[in-house]
Image (cartoon, grey):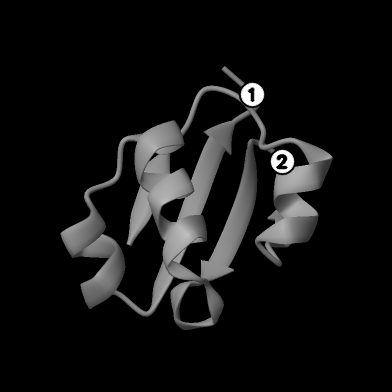
Amino acid sequence: MQKYIHYDPSPEEIYSLHMQVTSDSGHHYYKIHLSELTEGQRKHIAQRYGVSLNILEGEQYLTFVRITDI
């Protein structure tokens, strides 16, 4: 699943959620392996980024995409 976001996650979030960070000429990508997260981390993502907990439990990966070149 992909979710577009307006701001980059903080360095602390990237570290604590083990995000894989990549980018291309117009986007930053933050990939999260959902199976490696605790219930508390899933709740944090749901609240902070507006993703339903049901979706987080049913998906294997979540990728946040931030557009950098408009």
Pointer 1 residue: 69
How far from the left and from the top, in percent, is residue 38?
A: 50, 71
Residue 9 visible in the snapshot: yes
Question: Farthest residue in the front direction?
Answer: 40
| Label 2 residue SS | loop
* Residue depicted at x 43% and y 72%: 61
Q: Quadrant of residue 68?
A: top right
* Residue depicted at x 30% and y 64%: 56
Q: How far apart are the alpha carbons under marks 1 and 2?
A: 7 Å
Quarter of the N terminus within the rendering: bottom left
Q: Quadrant of residue 46?
A: top left
Vertical relation: 41 (above or below) 39: above
Residue 24 visible in the snapshot: no
Quarter of the C terminus within the rendering: top right
* Residue depicted at x 56% and y 35%: 66
Q: Amino acid at mark 1?
A: Asp
Query: Dot 1, crowdedness within 10 Å: few (<14), some or many (≥20)?
Result: few
Question: Farthest residue in the top direction?
Answer: 70
* Residue depicted at x 22% and y 49%: 52
How far from the left and from the top, in percent, is residue 26?
A: 64, 36
Pointer 2 residue: 25
Q: Amino acid at mark 2?
A: Ser
How far from the left and from the top, in percent, is residue 29?
A: 61, 51
Depth order, front residue of 68/46: 46
Labels 1 and 2: the sequence-earlier one: 2
Query: Dot 2, crowdedness within 10 Å: few (<14), some or many (≥20)?
Result: few
Image side of residue 39 versus residue 29, left or right: left
